[in-house]
Image: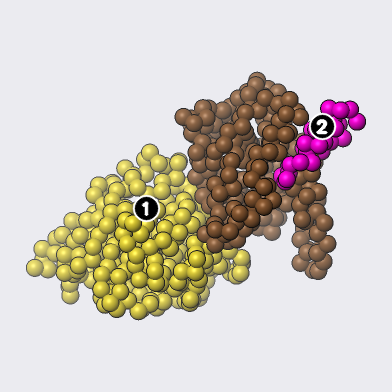
Chain colours: A yellow, B brown
């Protein structure tokens, strides 16, 4: 049984999440959220209707289910074309992603869902299209590492607000240096070029400000932490550019990886 | 004062709220929120003679009339007709528009109309948001000017991309910037986020953040200008601002040192549409 599962896992060209699908089968993801998942500011999800926005291979959706959610909906775009491609690479980007991750999006999620015997429901939709008339209201919404890939993160958060009747847990990549330089000012770095598909990377204050501006109040937040690279990530064995940068990252977040901030919020407007 | 000038003066006084200080005739200047006259000569203007030009977020039309004065063949001034079409932050969406209405008394375009008549201008006003710009709605332009608009947009990149679709020549972009996050202090392309309240302010970039926005939208950067200060006009509350204290003093000193005067720090860049 796990032999055929392993074949399926191996056949998927790119795993984004590191998921334990069976005792001896773990997906070779780009990112490994297992070390930090317990530290996130989870609300009580037992018996709740929950939504995971930008689910990719479904790590947070399956975690919601494991924690006792009554119903979990996992949202993601159906096609590589649907990313917010910067104008510069809009024509080539989708092809590039298809060559790296395979032409079909959502294969990893399907394999994982079946292997885990999960009843998470997948919905093909961009975050911008979220609305109560389309997906209903949710007691708990989670969204991880998505906003930096959006040209208009505020519009996305407003869409999330429109379907959130209870609590919202947001975990996003942050810029550490900007967080130290501007501990209170909401400042974000703008990229908008290149294959990394990054637009705005906020500092800790700007991450909070984004969520606040969209109509939430912040209930609590945790210290910045790092999403660890999984075995598939090119930076897994990094020749990091400088030793001091590496040291600073470990000092500030406790590990190597991509610096993140996480918070729990509830609607205010 | 001639009868004609007296008529103009009377019309100017009946406009509930002026945004721009515009000289409509010798001795007649509209009492605006902002006075762009001191900085208009510092901008990296392209040659607009004989060109088809667009002013985005025109308000009372200062830049549109300036384009015309500089010899543009045709000038279109685009702006929203209704304050409800602004990108209101969620927490101001309900009350904000009504509050602005109290100032303008529903006459959003009155100032532009008065100025256009007084200047015998042929500028054409189009009511639309920046997001609605497209070759289908307005055609193509040789020159596009956009001033002090991006900070009021939730998605400034979408706004600039819309401009790119109608620009076959150059974009002159003049935007508010954060001095304290710009050289000589810092060089990163960053922006500060507000997104709350009735100021309708979202992203205010650093100098390099502003350039990055323009570049990302599909333009190649050319000559730049600034930072310079856009002065407050007589109707701006800050014109009679007597705030004291260390923070206010520090801000004024910083503005004087880096932008040459007290006002709203701006930077400008002239950029060419990339293929």
Relative to B133, is A21 above or below?
below
Q: Position of residue B14 (x, y in %)?
A: 76, 41
Viewer-closest of B220 and A256: B220
Instruction: Using the rendered image of the protein, determine whether residue B11 is visible from the camera's viewpoint.
Output: yes
Per the rendered image, the range of residues in magenta is B1-29
Viewer-closest of B146 and A19: B146
Q: Residue at x 16, y 64 (%)?
A: A114
Relative to A103, is A35 above or below?
below
> What separation in Å lies between label 2 and label 1 (alpha carbons)?
52 Å
Q: Residue at x 42, y 68 (%)?
A: A170
Q: Position of residue A176 (x, y in %)?
A: 53, 66
Residue at label 2? B7
Residue at label 1? A129
Q: Position of residue A93 (x, y in %)?
A: 37, 44
Q: Which mark is residue B120?
A: none
Q: Describe residue A260's horizontal placement relative to residue B269 as left or right.
A: left
Viewer-closest of A180 and A153: A153
**In this view, which residue lies farthest toward the left?**
A1
Relative to A138, is B226 above or below?
above
What chain is tagged by disc 1? A
* Residue B76 part of the magenta segment: no
Task: Indicate the quadrant containing the N terminus of chain B: top left, top right, bottom left or bottom right.
Answer: top right
């Amino acid at each position: 049984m796990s032999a055929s599962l392993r074949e399926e896992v191996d056949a998927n060209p790119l795993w984004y999440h590191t998921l334990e699908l069976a005792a001896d089968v773990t997906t070779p993801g780009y990112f490994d959220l297992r070390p930090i998942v317990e530290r996130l500011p989870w609300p009580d999800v037992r018996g709740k209707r929950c939504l995971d926005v930008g689910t990719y291979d479904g790590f947070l959706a399956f975690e919601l289910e494991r924690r006792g959610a009554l119903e979990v909906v996992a949202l993601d775009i159906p096609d590589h074309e649907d990313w917010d491609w910067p104008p510069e690479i809009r024509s080539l980007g989708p092809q590039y992603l298809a060559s790296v991750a395979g032409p079909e999006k959502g294969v990893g999620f399907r394999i994982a869902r079946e292997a885990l015997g999960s009843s998470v429901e997948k919905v093909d939709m961009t975050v911008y299209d979220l609305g109560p008339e389309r997906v209903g209201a949710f007691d708990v919404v989670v969204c991880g590492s998505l906003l930096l890939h959006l040209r208009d993160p505020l519009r996305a958060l407003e869409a999330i607000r429109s379907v959130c009747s209870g609590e919202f847990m947001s975990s996003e990549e942050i810029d550490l240096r900007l967080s130290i330089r501007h501990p209170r000012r909401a400042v974000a770095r703008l990229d908008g070029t290149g294959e990394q598909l990054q637009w705005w990377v906020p500092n800790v204050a700007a991450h909070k400000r984004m969520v606040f501006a969209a109509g939430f109040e912040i209930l609590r937040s945790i210290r910045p932490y790092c999403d660890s690279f999984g075995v598939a990530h090119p930076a897994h064995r990094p020749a990091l550019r400088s030793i001091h940068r590496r040291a600073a990252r470990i000092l500030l977040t406790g590990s190597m990886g991509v610096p993140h901030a996480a918070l729990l919020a509830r609607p205010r407007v | 004062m001639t009868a004609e000038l007296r008529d103009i003066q009377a019309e100017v006084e009946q406009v509930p709220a002026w945004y721009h200080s515009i000289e409509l005739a010798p001795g007649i200047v509209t009492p605006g929120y902002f006075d762009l006259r001191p900085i208009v000569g510092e901008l990296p203007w392209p040659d607009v003679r004989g060109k088809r030009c667009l002013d985005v977020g025109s308000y009372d039309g200062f830049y549109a009339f300036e384009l015309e004065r500089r010899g543009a063949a045709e000038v279109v001034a685009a702006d929203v007709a209704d304050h409800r079409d602004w990108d209101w932050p969620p927490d101001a969406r309900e009350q904000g528009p009504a509050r602005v209405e109290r100032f303008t008394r529903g006459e959003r375009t009155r100032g532009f109309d008065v100025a256009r008549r007084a200047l015998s201008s042929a500028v054409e006003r189009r009511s639309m948001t920046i997001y609605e710009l497209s070759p289908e709605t307005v055609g193509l332009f040789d020159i596009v000017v956009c001033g002090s608009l991006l900070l009021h947009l939730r998605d400034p990149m979408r706004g600039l991309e819309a401009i790119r679709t109608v620009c076959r020549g150059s974009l002159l972009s003049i935007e508010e910037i954060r001095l304290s996050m710009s050289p000589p202090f810092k060089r990163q392309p960053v922006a500060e986020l507000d997104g709350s309240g009735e100021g309708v302010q979202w992203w205010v970039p650093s100098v390099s953040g502003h350039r990055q926005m323009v570049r990302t939208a599909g333009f190649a950067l050319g000559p730049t200008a600034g930072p310079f200060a856009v002065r407050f006009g007589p109707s701006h509350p800050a014109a009679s601002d007597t705030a004291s204290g260390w923070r206010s003093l520090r801000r004024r000193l910083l503005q004087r040192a880096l932008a040459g005067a007290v006002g709203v720090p701006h930077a400008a860049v002239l950029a060419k549409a990339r293929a």
